[in-house]
Image (tube, helix red, strand yellow):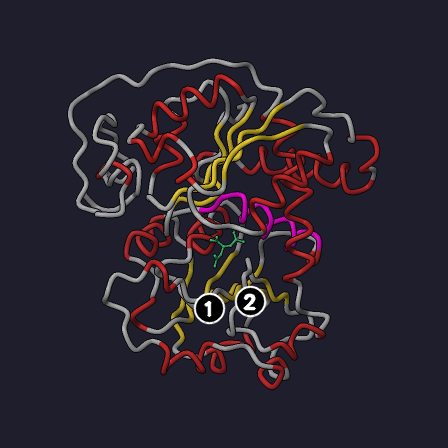
């Protein structure tokens, strides 16, 4: 089935991933063959929240395909500051562009946007919820460094509460065989309940560890994340004193497997000691470059899709208790439930 929008990895199949990855490897092997592949196509790049890698890699990807882009990285410069709704901003922007990539601090914002767009919408991060194109980057790096995705023990370390890249990666790895997780985080930043419920529902094996030292020897992939301090809601005070237990050092690397793959979506703050960068098992800078190529494959597909819109039917008011959910400010959004009966936008329990 063709994929229209990339909002959550839950919406795509392994066959879709395989096709995208194949296209990515072809682009990596012969980038010059693709330099006009998106000639005449326009990407709208709507960043309501700060970004370095994701925004630049989409820009670089579009330019390397011969396409062009417009957009903003500061919503204060747009009519959103005059009170325009997300739906109207998207409807209008989609009439100019061939694909929209959007990052927004509200959970569920990309899904909401996709309901009002004439062209495909790519979720480049919706608050602490999901970040599926980072997951494309992560899967590409795992496939490139390990040959296959699956048959791995993956350590997820750091801020598992607000780390949207972690949530998307778990959602994606549910589709691959024999993936075990070790969740390595302080209690205040542990994996949210809706994600552990997802893991149980998908029969994914996971263990919990209270330090990196106790877990590192068992891991094939170590996924490090920074503390998402900007998303704290008051319940996470005093985590700083604990963070040394969740910091990757050159000393700890001595206890790790010789073929460990260390990933990090970046930006790194101080959760990975600089001395680790020279270790050949540290793949996080290569990971950022792979991200550009897999985004090229995604844009090549999405910018060539037919234009069209089906306005959502209004079936009653949507009520969600999550103050960070997009439905808290975009009050017109139609009622929508996910497969587990949770909020169809942010996935939290209603
Ligand atoms: C991540 C993000 O924005 O969620 N960065 C990225 O896109 N590469 C991780 C982070 O900000 O910590």
Disc 2: CA contacts within 10 A as few (<14), some (14-19) or many (>=20): many
Q: Earlier in the sequence, mark 2 or mark 1?
A: 1
Q: Which residue is drawn at 60% across and 83% down?
A: 255
x%, y% of residue 347? 29, 43
Element at label 2: strand
143 shown above or below 29: below
x%, y% of residue 160? 39, 62
Q: Residue at x 28, y 57 (%)?
A: 193
> In this rendering, would 1 be left or right of 198?
right
Which part of the image, by quadrant, shows the C terminus? top left
18 shown above or below 182: above
Q: What stretch is highlighted in magenta?
A: 131-144
Q: Residue 222 carries which label?
A: 2
Q: Which residue is drawn at 39% across and 48% down?
A: 202
Q: Looking at the image, do the residues carrying marks 2 and 1 touch, with CB atoms under 8 Å apart?
A: yes
- According to the picture, the residue beneath numbered tag 1 turns out to be 157
Q: In this view of the protein, which residue sits in the foreground, 83 or 287?
A: 83
Whether residue 86 appears in magenta in the rendering, the answer is no
């Amino acid at each position: 089935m063709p994929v229209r929008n990339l909002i959550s990895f839950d919406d795509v199949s392994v066959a879709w991933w395989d096709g995208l990855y194949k296209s990515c490897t072809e682009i990596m092997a012969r980038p010059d063959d693709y330099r006009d592949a998106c000639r005449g196509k326009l990407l709208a790049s709507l960043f309501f929240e700060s970004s370095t890698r994701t925004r630049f890699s989409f820009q670089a990807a579009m330019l390397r395909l011969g396409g062009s882009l417009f957009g903003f990285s500061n919503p204060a410069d747009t009519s959103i500051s005059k009170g325009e709704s997300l739906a109207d901003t998207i409807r209008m922007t989609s009439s100019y562009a061939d694909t929209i990539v959007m990052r927004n601090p509200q959970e569920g914002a990309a899904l909401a946007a996709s309901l009002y767009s004439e062209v495909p919408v790519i979720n480049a991060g919706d608050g602490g919820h999901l970040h599926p194109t980072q997951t494309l980057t992560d899967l590409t790096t795992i496939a490139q460094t390990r040959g296959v995705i699956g048959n791995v023990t993956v350590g997820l370390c750091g801020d598992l509460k607000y780390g949207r890249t972690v949530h998307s990666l778990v959602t994606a790895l549910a589709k691959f065989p024999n993936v075990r997780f070790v969740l390595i985080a302080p209690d205040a930043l542990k994996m949210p309940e809706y994600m552990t419920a997802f893991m149980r529902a998908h029969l994914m094996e996971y263990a919990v560890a209270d330090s990196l030292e106790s877990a590192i020897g068992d891991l094939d992939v170590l996924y490090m994340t920074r503390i998402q301090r900007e998303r704290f809601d008051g319940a996470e005070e005093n985590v700083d004193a604990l963070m040394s237990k969740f910091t990757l050092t050159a000393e700890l690397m001595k206890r790790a497997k010789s073929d460990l793959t260390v990933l990090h979506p970046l930006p790194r703050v101080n959760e990975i000691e600089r001395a680790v960068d020279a270790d050949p098992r540290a793949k996080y800078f290569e990971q950022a470059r792979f991200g550009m190529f897999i985004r090229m494959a995604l844009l090549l597909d999405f910018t060539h899709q037919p234009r069209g819109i089906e306005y959502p039917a209004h079936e009653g008011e949507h009520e969600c208790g999550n103050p960070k959910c997009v439905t808290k400010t975009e009050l017109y959004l139609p009622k929508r439930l996910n497969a587990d009966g949770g909020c169809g936008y942010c996935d939290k329990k209603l």
